[in-house]
Image (cartoon, rainbow, N blue to C red):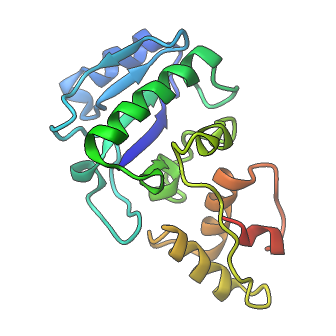
Amino acid sequence: MVVLHYTAMADAASALERLCDPSAEVSAHYLIDGTGEVIQMVQEADRAWHAGAGEWGGLADINSRSIGIELDNRGTHPFSAPQMDALEDLLRVIMARWSIPPEGVIGHSDMAPGRKADPGPHFDWVRLERQGLAAPARRFDDGGGDAAAFIRAAQAAGYTALCDFDTLLHTVRLRRAPWRSGPLTAADFTL
């Protein structure tokens, strides 16, 4: 799979320095700066330390089974067009090389609910979905709109990491509807 992140740092140079510092114990396969420059730091076949604890689709140890892409962004503003263009080009190559389906492209927040928020509410998932580079939202039966039905739907969509209901709802909304808040609604079953 591919896990998308934002750096949450002042600039790409600071992020690159940290991602290449062994004492930081964090790395990623790629860093894409705001101008669209792609920097490879770890070979795709090698393990990078970008995901940490979490789970997606019933699979744990995400670091061993994923390629991590860091995007130079603090999480407080939209991602630049050149950066998104470069990400799309890179995803096409990676997905073809490793036979990764759109469902295998996730955000850090998707596999680590409550612990991580990246790539955050300003990331344009719909743009990737339209090109087949991320899974489109699916409508699930709301089962009368109760929490148990939502948990079942979220698990079927891949959100299998253990967390409480409120954290799960927030995590799904972060990806599918970051503007939505309040109690569970029928719209939340499109995930």
Which quarter of the figure has residue 147? bottom right
Whether residue 112 is visible to the viewer of this picture, yes or no, is: no
Task: Say above or below: 129 vs 27.
Answer: below
Q: Position of residue 7 (x, y in %)?
A: 48, 28
Q: How many marks?
A: 0
Q: What residue is rendered at 60% in x and 68% in y?
A: 168
Residue 141 seen from this side: yes
Q: Please state the horizontal and vertical placement of residue 184, each as a whole percent of the image.
A: 79, 74
- Which residue lies at the image location 44% right of the left edge and 69% below the top edge? 161
Which quadrant of the figure contains the C terminus? bottom right
Task: Establish if 103 lies above or below 39.
Answer: below
**Residue 80 pos. (x, y %):** 64, 18
Q: From the viewer's side, name the closer residue of 36 and 78.
A: 36
Q: Is residue 180 above or below residue 165?
A: above
Tell me: 104 left or right of 83.
Answer: left
Residue at (25, 20) in percent of width and height: 20
Among all residues in the image, which is located at the extreme left? Answer: 46
Left-right relation of 120 to 72: right
Identify which residue is drawn at 18% across, 41% down.
47
